[in-house]
Image (tube, rainbow, N blue to C red):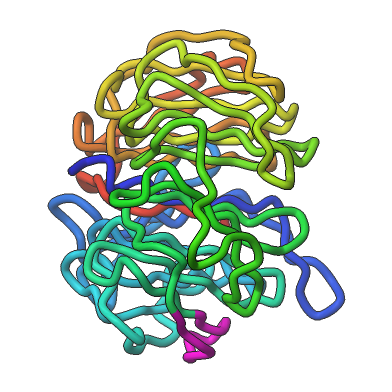
Amino acid sequence: MRRYYLLWAAMVFVLFGGGSFALAGNNLIAGGGTTAGSWERRSASGGFLNSGTLWATRISHCAVLLPNGNTFLAGGSASGGTWEIRNATGGHVSNGTLWTTRDWAFTCSLLGNGNVLIVGGGASPATWEIRNGAGGFVSQGTLWTSRYGHSASVLSNGNVLITGGYGSSGTWEIRGTNGSLVSGTSTTGIYLWSGRSGHCSIQLNNGNMLLVGGGPGYISWELRNSSMTLISANYTWASRDGSTCTKLLNGNVLIVGGSWSPGTWEIRSSTGALVSNGNLWVGRDGHQAELQTNTGNVLITGGTVSPGTWELRSATGALIGSGNLNASRYGHTQNEQ
């Protein structure tokens, strides 16, 4: 299903070696669609920079920006048991094998220690594994419940919140940086306000969590505090499934597209209130959206409806620019570098 293509990777800066790695404002767009074995780089304004070939063909994979500026890519329906690392110009650094096959609907999260937590997925829905920044195996284990089509968000305290997913759409669990279960037990469920699969979740500037859309609560959102206690819940402006959520520099959240409403966007405040809404340049589902930290704009790429296009939107949702990608992409990844 197209909703499985929802993936998460957004960072403003990361600490490394006592200093900081500043983002250059370029974007590595990798895999997906009819050219799943390729990558391309785009500037913060959407302009083409360069392109090349991946080590393995990847669709519905995951990608995270590492503290040293490289990008870690893992799994995907064509190469589910593998990973590779690309540098800031797209060049190949290294590659290897995952602990288990991760083919679709899984998540990757960058931990504060530079490791990567990989969770669930269609082929291994009840497991997690941790890789270090060089791709090396660190540890693995079992989730509280099976998950695919879930979401994972790194919290301000370094833990990872995992919500929803098919088979466990109404539950959540929190994992520590070593993969251990922080909240939840093997016998007690921790329940969401609505079942959610193919949804998005994001931590707001005030520490609260906003969860949006996903089945079966496609047209709802819920707001929770850092302890995951429910604060409020209500309805979205449009039904959302497989949409993207991007936190803007002003703290609002831009929600884009999805299989039920591919041609629309809406912006919500930190209270969940609707700020504004409108129409996209083209319909989008299975797309990617990334905050451009140098400008505050959001670069939106590809998707099953319009796989060969990109558009750039401001913090108010206004269209700034649009154009064509170097290749058709859906189920791809996009990371600002």
Residue 54's place in the image compared with 32, above or below, is below
- Residue 159, given in percent of the width and then of the height, sits at 67, 63
- Residue 223, given in percent of the width and then of the height, sits at 63, 29
- Residue 302, given in percent of the width and then of the height, sits at 30, 38
Q: Residue furthest front?
A: 187
Q: Residue furthest right?
A: 18
Image quadrant containing the N terminus: top left
In the drawing, does residue 258 fall left or right of residue 270? left
Q: How many numbered discs, if any? A: 0
In the drawing, does residue 141 fall left or right of residue 66? left
Q: Nearer the viewer, residue 127 or 194?
A: 194
Q: Residue at x 53, y 34 (%)?
A: 211
Residue 134 is covered by the magenta coloring: yes
Q: Residue at x 45, y 10 (%)?
A: 237
Q: Nearer the viewer, residue 91 or 281?
A: 281
Q: Nearer the viewer, residue 45 or 185?
A: 185
Residue 333: quadrant of the picture: bottom left
Q: Residue at x 39, y 19 (%)?
A: 219
Residue 80: quadrant of the picture: bottom left
Q: Residue furthest left?
A: 34
Residue 131's place in the image compared with 240, above or below, is below
Residue 144's place in the image compared with 299, above or below, is below
Residue 140's place in the image compared with 334, above or below, is below
- Residue 257, given in percent of the width and then of the height, sits at 36, 25
* Residue range highlighted in magenta: 130-141
Image quadrant containing the C terminus: bottom right
Residue 207 is covered by the magenta coloring: no
